[in-house]
Amino acid sequence: MNPETEFREGLDDLASHYKSIIELLGEDTGREGLQKTPMRVAKAMQILTRGYGQDAHKVLLDALFEEKYSQMVIVKDIDFFSLCEHHMLPFYGKVHVAYIPNGYITGLSKIARVVDIFSHRLQVQERMTLQIKDCIQETLKPLGVMVVVEAKHMCMQMRGVEKQNAITTTSDFSGAFNQAKTREEFMNLLHSEVRHI
C-alpha cells in the first residue's frame, strides 16, 4: 500500500474518533464551527506525537564528529511542549543538557532535536528526563551527561489543584556528574548571566 494512502487512512480514523468524542460531549459536529474540527484535531495529534516515528539515536549519530575537546558542553533553555499521558493535556518548559565529550561530539542542534523527539510523545516529565539522558549517554558515550527539565503542567493549572505558577523540576545524570562538584559547576553555569561579547 502507498505510504501516503496509509497515512491518510490513519488520519481519517483519528478524525472519526474525535468526531465521536465531540458528539459524546454534547456538541453538534454538523454546525459550521465544528465541521472541520475532528480533522484539525487529528492532524494536530499526529504532529504532537510525531516522536514515535523518529529515532533519537540516529539523529545524534548522523552528526557525530571526532574531537579531542573534553570540557563540559552545555545546551540550555531548549523550549519544549509535550502531552501528559495521564490527562493528555500539555506540559511545557525548558530543558538544559550538559555532557562531557569522550573523543566525540555531536552537532549542537542535534541535542535540541533529541529533546524534540522525546517530548513529541505521550509522556511524564520524569521519564522524558531519563530518556534524553540515556539517549545521549548510550549514543555519544561521553564521560557524563546531565539533564534538567523545568516545566509547567496544564493538568495542574486547568484541573485538579488549579495551581497556576507551580513549576516541576526533574534531573538525571550519569558518569562524571555523579560527583557533586561537577553537578555544581553545571548548575552554576546554568544560572549564570550570559555576557555579550
Image (spheres, rainbow, N blue to C red):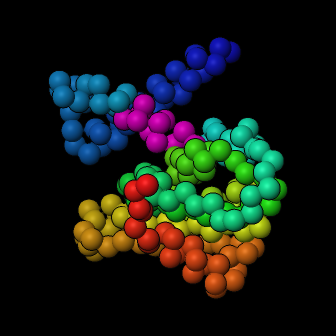
Q: In the rendered view of the protein, which quadrant contains the N terminus?
A: top right
Find the residue positioned furthest to the front: 197
* Outermost residue to the bottom: 180
Which quarter of the rendered picture does the C terminus lie within? Answer: bottom left
Residue 5 visible: yes
Q: Position of residue 67 (x, y in %)?
A: 78, 51
For the point 20% across and 33% down, the residue is 28
Q: Residue at coordinates 60% horizontally, 21% vertically from top-left? A: 6
Which residue is drawn at the image coordinates 65% and 14% (left, top)? 2
Q: Is residue 183 magenta?
A: no
Residue 162, image quadrant: bottom left
Query: Which residue in the rendered view is the most extreme toward the left?
Result: 32
Q: Main secondary structure of the magenta part?
A: helix
Report the number of numbered marks.
0
Q: Nearer the viewer, residue 10 or 60?
A: 60
Q: Is residue 73 left or right of residue 68?
A: left
Q: Nearer the viewer, residue 137 or 53?
A: 137
Residue located at (44% from left, 71% from top): 192
182 on left or right of 101: left
- Residue 64 found in image quarter: top right
Q: Position of residue 89 (x, y in %)?
A: 37, 55
Magenta span = 41-51
Q: Is 32 situated above or below 56?
A: above
Check the image and report above or below for 189 versus 27.
Answer: below
Where is residue 176, by image quadrant?
bottom right
Q: Does residue 87 appear anywhere in the picture?
A: no
- Front residue of 93/118: it is 93
Q: At which x and y percent is residue 99?
A: 67, 63
Which percent across, then down, holds residue 187? 52, 75
Q: Is residue 45 a member of the stretch shown in magenta? A: yes
